[in-house]
Amino acid sequence: MLGPMLVNLGPMLVKLRPMLAKLRPMLVKIGPMLVKIGPILVKVRSKFS
């Protein structure tokens, strides 16, 4: 079942790759922040749910 999906995703990934290359430096900066914020978001979500 994954075969056709992967074939369809191929062109999309090719298009996305340049964007990902641009985003990667931002992700490297944001990553540590997300690691710190993540647990807080989980706590907030569990309160509101």
Image (spheres, rainbow, N blue to C red):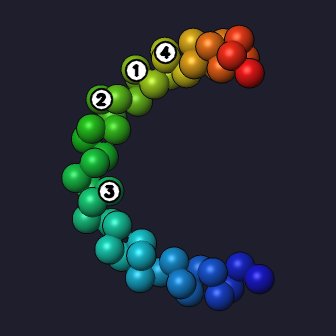
Mark 1 residue type: Met
The residue pinned by badge 3 equals 20
Q: Residue 9: which disc? A: none
Eyeballing the image, is 25 above or below 40? below
Q: Examine the image and state in which quarter residue 34 appears.
A: top left
In the foreground, 12 or 27: 12
Q: Are marks 3 and 2 in contact (CB under 8 Å)?
A: no
Q: Are marks 1 and 4 in contact (CB under 8 Å)?
A: yes
Q: Residue at x 41, y 82 (%)?
A: 11
- Residue 39, visible in the rendered structure: no
28 lies left or right of 35: left
Mark 3 residue type: Leu
Q: Residue at x 25, y 41 (%)?
A: 25
Q: Residue 29: which disc? A: 2
Q: Are marks 3 and 1 in contact (CB under 8 Å)?
A: no
Mark 2 and mark 1: span between their CA atoms? 8 Å
Mark 1 and mark 4: span between their CA atoms? 5 Å
Picture coordinates of residue 16, whole percent (x, y): 34, 67
Mark 3 and mark 2: span between their CA atoms? 14 Å
Q: Examine the image and state in which quarter residue 20 appears.
A: bottom left
Numbered disc 1: secondary structure = helix
10 lies left or right of 45: left
Q: Residue at x 34, y 29 (%)?
A: 30
Picture coordinates of residue 13, whole percent (x, y): 42, 72
The residue pinned by badge 1 equals 33
